[in-house]
Image (cartoon, rainbow, N blue to C red):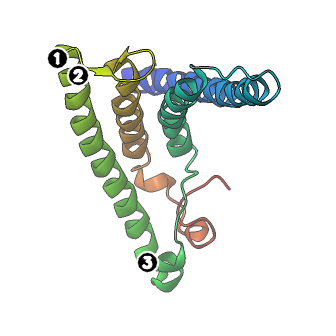
Amino acid sequence: MNVFSTATRWHDRLTTAGYYVGCLALAIIFGAYIIEVFGRYFFNAPQWWASEAVSYSLCAGTFMMMPYVTWKRGHVAVALIFDVLPPRAVRPAVWFTYLMGAVACALAAWITGGETVRQWANDVHIMAVEPVPKYLISWFLPFGFASSTLHFLRLLDWRKIDPAQAGALGGFGES
């Protein structure tokens, strides 16, 4: 067993764990809204933490789920370009799309990672009812972008790009 296959297996496991964290974040959002509605309208006791829990969970859930969506090629795609191109050009177009996704996610990971480190170094807090160190929320962004970058790079395998599926799926999605 080579190092690359071991690393990709661990990356897939980490991505799957992130998927479940994203699902948990969605459950927290749902639960916080239910508690807030019942507390506010039935018991006249609004919860100070519900809005913050929803905001933080939305950030965490989005960026923990992002690598899973990338891995499964579940992004929204406009497939018209792949229908218009000649068949010989479809595979390079899909490959180029994956490359641009990798570049964009890598750049976003670099920018958000630098900002997260700055927040940690300067001890920046979110000003809310209960101040929270901002980097505790922000680290989800570079994690999601960096992991998605790795998934896009793994999708660059020329042999695994099926031009026949590109028109129907926009080069994305599982068949």
* Label 3 neighbour load within 10 Å: few <14, some 14-19, many 20+: few
Please give the residue where the numbered disc 1 appears in the rendered image: 122
Give residue 153's position: percent from left, percent from top: 36, 44
Q: Quadrant of residue 97?
A: bottom left
Please give the residue where the numbered disc 2 appears in the rendered image: 119
Question: What residue is rendered at 52% in x and 71% in y?
Answer: 78
Give residue 89's position: percent from left, percent from top: 40, 76
Task: Give the numbered dot on residue 88.
Answer: 3
Question: What residue is rendered at 47% in x and 78% in y?
Answer: 81
Closer to the eye: label 3 or 2: 2
Element type at mark 2: helix
Q: Quadrant of residue 35?
A: top right
Q: Nearer the viewer, residue 106 or 115?
A: 115
Tag 3: amino acid: Arg
Task: Give the numbered dot on residue 37.
Answer: none
Give residue 57's position: percent from left, percent from top: 55, 28
Tag 1: amino acid: Asn
Tag 2: amino acid: Gln
User: Which badge, 3 or 1, comes first in the chain's sequence?
Assistant: 3
Q: Nearer the viewer, residue 49 or 105?
A: 49
Q: Are marks 2 and 1 in contact (CB under 8 Å)?
A: yes
Residue 65 versus residue 128 in the image, above or below:
below
Residue 105 versus residue 129 in the image, above or below:
below
